[in-house]
Image (cartoon, rainbow, N blue to C red):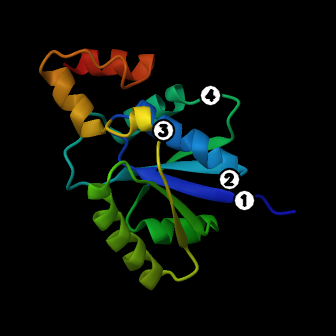
Amino acid sequence: MSKRVAIYAGTFDPMTIGHRDLVERSLICFDKVILAVGINPKKKTMFSVDERMELATASLEPSWNVEVTSFSGLLVNYAKERGVNVLVRGLRAFSDFEFELQMALTNRKLEPEVETLFLMPSEEYSYISSSRVKEVASLGGDISDFVTKPVHKAILAKL
């Protein structure tokens, strides 16, 4: 029997508990999740790709069947290279839907065999975003409820 594998991709700058929640939800549906940290030279990130991968790994349970990797270029090309045909995307609010739908339809046009599965986070995490976490932290706010301890420590060290 073949394993059911999905890719959950993003910038993860930084990894939040909302991201962690989506990984956990994905593992209900899939035997393995590849958490793919995107490399986009156009985005100014707080953490390097290696740091983002380390923080993602530190934020996940060791017993979970998750492989943390990085990729650059088109996600559908990366999925095809890995032999994966499902991309997991999180929808926090209606405002995410339009962007995510356009991306999913573009990906489908580029690679019809790759499907996008939308998952919603737990309600308690639906407002958390990496950019909001960085903004709150930069203004001296407490982000401990939004990120794991390793991420919290890393953000404070950067600031």
| Spatial CA span between label 3 and label 4 | 18 Å
Asked if the residue at tag 4 contacts the one at tag 1, i.e. Cβ–Cβ closer than 8 Å, the answer is: no
The secondary element bearing badge 4 is classed as loop
Q: What's under tag 1, amino acid-wise?
A: Arg
| Spatial CA span between label 3 and label 1 | 23 Å
**Residue 19 location, x and y as percent?**
45, 39
Give the mark nearest the N terminus, 3 or 1: 1
Asked if the residue at tag 1 contacts the one at tag 2, i.e. Cβ–Cβ closer than 8 Å, the answer is: yes
What's the residue at 19%, 45% (across, down)?
A: 44
Q: Which residue is mark 2?
A: 29
| Spatial CA span between label 2 and label 1 | 8 Å
**Residue 78 location, x and y as percent?**
50, 65
Screen quadrant of the N terminus: bottom right
Q: What's under tag 3, amino acid-wise?
A: Ser
The answer to whether one can see residue 67 in this image is: no
On residue 96, the disc is: none
Direction from residue 66 to residue 98 in the image, left or right: left
Q: Say if 97 sits above or below 59 in the image.
A: below
| Spatial CA span between label 1 and label 4 | 19 Å
Q: What's under tag 4, amino acid-wise?
A: Glu
**Residue 74 location, x and y as percent?**
40, 68
Quarter occupied by residue 62: top right
On residue 122, the disc is: 3
**Residue 59 location, x and y as percent?**
50, 27
Q: What's under tag 2, amino acid-wise?
A: Cys
Between disc 3 and disc 4, the foreground one is: 3
The secondary element bearing badge 1 is classed as loop
